[in-house]
Amino acid sequence: MDKIVKSIIDFRNDRGWENNDKPENLAKSIIIEAAELLENYQWGPDHADLVNVKEELADVIIYSIAMAYDLGFDIEKMIQEKLVKNAVKYPVKK
């Protein structure tokens, strides 16, 4: 995980974009990219362009990782904590 986070942050910083990457802007970018992802399914799953789905999903993940990094969140810990919380909220039905 550390390697991919470093790659994302280095890519951004090498281009001087870190000054624009405020949490508000990153949150907006996540929603914009998520909408572009959703466009693939506007007319149903049979119309999805899977190459574009992969690219838009990557954009959502990249912006999300950048936002988590900038806010000082431990990404792995954050995900694990949310999975634990979700397990309580949505227990396995037997």
Image (spheres, grey):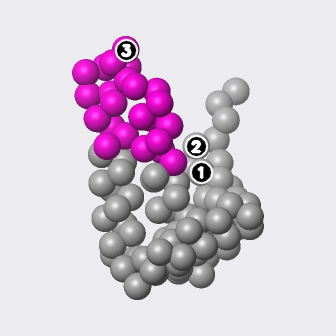
Q: Is residue 52 magenta?
A: yes
In this view, 58 is above or below 77: above
Residues at discs 3 and 2 in contact (Cβ within 8 Å): no
Q: Which residue is mark 3?
A: 46
Residue at image x 59%, y 81%?
72
What's the magenta region?
Answer: 36-58
* Marks 3 and 2, how far apart at CA: 30 Å
Q: Secondary structure at mark 1?
A: helix
C-alpha distance separating marks 1 and 2? 6 Å
Q: Is residue 86 above or below residue 7?
A: above
Q: Which residue is mark 2?
A: 90
Along the viewing direction, whichever of 30 and 17 lies nearer the viewer = 17
Q: What secondary structure is the magenta-colored segment mainly?
A: helix
Q: Name the outermost residue toward the left.
A: 43
Q: CA distance from mark 3 to mark 1?
A: 30 Å
Q: Residue 86 shows which numbered tag?
A: 1
Q: Nearer the viewer, mark 3 or mark 1?
A: 3
Mark 2: amino acid: Tyr
Q: Is residue 82 above or below residue 42?
A: below
Q: In the rendered structure, which disc, 3 or 2, sits on the residue that comes first in sequence? A: 3
Residue reaching furthest to the right: 2
In the image, residue 46 lies at what x, y percent? 37, 14
Q: Which amino acid, mark 1?
A: Asn
